[in-house]
Image (cartoon, rainbow, N blue to C red):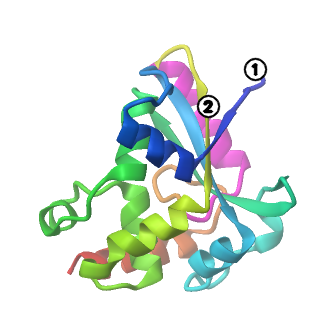
């Protein structure tokens, strides 16, 4: 089954959420995060052993983007809003209610909690998010298993077979230290 992804500028999506005009379906799906090369290199710099040659790359316009994260959701609209527009409250960070992607970006950027929301938003606003609706939870999980086994997504932790255990260990350590 070939997936057809719809690509969205995160900056434009943030505006759509503010204006309540977002057209992302409330259905099962998969999604990917694409970062411009300069942001991608900043994000992966703290991780020893990332093989940049294995990262999927695409030109969007005249700029190179790297795909660093793959995710699944029961509700694509809610998940995109969670990642794109969530506030970094102390409670959300301490109790694990901050989006996994936002936790990871905050930890890798090594910014104090009070500054992390602005820094993460700045990084995300330069990124693209693409998504594809899937039929069911089972289909979604099967696609996730395939992508995280065959692809190289250095910012994923759970079910990620494409990167080394050492990179996953580093990500976990950065996130744990960040939450303290």
Closer-to-camera residue (37/11): 11
Closer-to-camera residue (96/5): 5
**What residue is at 24 percent from the left and 79 percent from the top?**
114
Question: Would you name the residue on which mark 1 appears?
Answer: 1
Closer-to-camera residue (39/48): 39
**What residue is at 51 percent from the left and 43 percent from the top?**
13
In the picture, measured across the screen, residue 114 lies left or right of residue 143, that is left
In the picture, measured across the screen, residue 72 lies left or right of residue 5, that is left
Q: Are marks 2 and 1 in contact (CB under 8 Å)?
A: yes
Locate residue 177: give its quadrant: bottom left
- Secondary structure, magenta segment, majority class: helix
Marks 2 and 1, how far apart in space?
Answer: 9 Å
> x and y percent of residue 90 in the render?
15, 69
Residue 143 has which mark? 2
**What residue is at 54 percent from the left and 60 percent from the top?**
125
Q: Judge whether residue 76 is colored magenta.
A: no
> x and y percent of residue 28 in the render?
47, 23
**What residue is at 75 percent from the left and 20 percent from the top?**
1
The answer to whether one can see residue 83 in this image is: yes
Residue 66 has which mark? none
Q: Which residues are magenta?
A: 137-155
Q: Judge whether residue 141 is colored magenta.
A: yes
Is 19 placed above or below 154 here?
above
């Amino acid at each position: 089954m070939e997936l057809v992804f719809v690509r969205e500028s995160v900056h434009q999506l943030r505006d759509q959420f503010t204006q309540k005009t977002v057209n992302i379906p409330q259905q099962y799906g998969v999604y990917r995060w694409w970062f411009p090369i300069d942001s991608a290199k900043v994000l992966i710099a703290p991780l020893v052993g990332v093989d940049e040659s294995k990262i999927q790359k695409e030109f969007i316009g005249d700029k190179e983007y790297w795909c660093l994260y793959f995710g699944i959701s029961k509700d694509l609209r809610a998940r995109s809003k969670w990642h794109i527009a969530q506030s970094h409250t102390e409670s959300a960070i301490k109790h694990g209610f901050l989006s996994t992607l936002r936790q990871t970006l905050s930890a890798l950027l090594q910014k104090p909690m009070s500054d992390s929301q602005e820094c993460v938003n700045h990084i995300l606003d330069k990124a693209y998010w693409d998504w594809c609706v899937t039929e069911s939870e089972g289909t979604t999980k099967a696609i996730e298993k395939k992508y995280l086994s065959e692809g190289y997504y250095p910012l994923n932790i759970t079910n990620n077979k494409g990167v080394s255990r050492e990179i996953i260990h580093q990500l976990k350590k950065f996130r744990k230290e960040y939450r303290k």
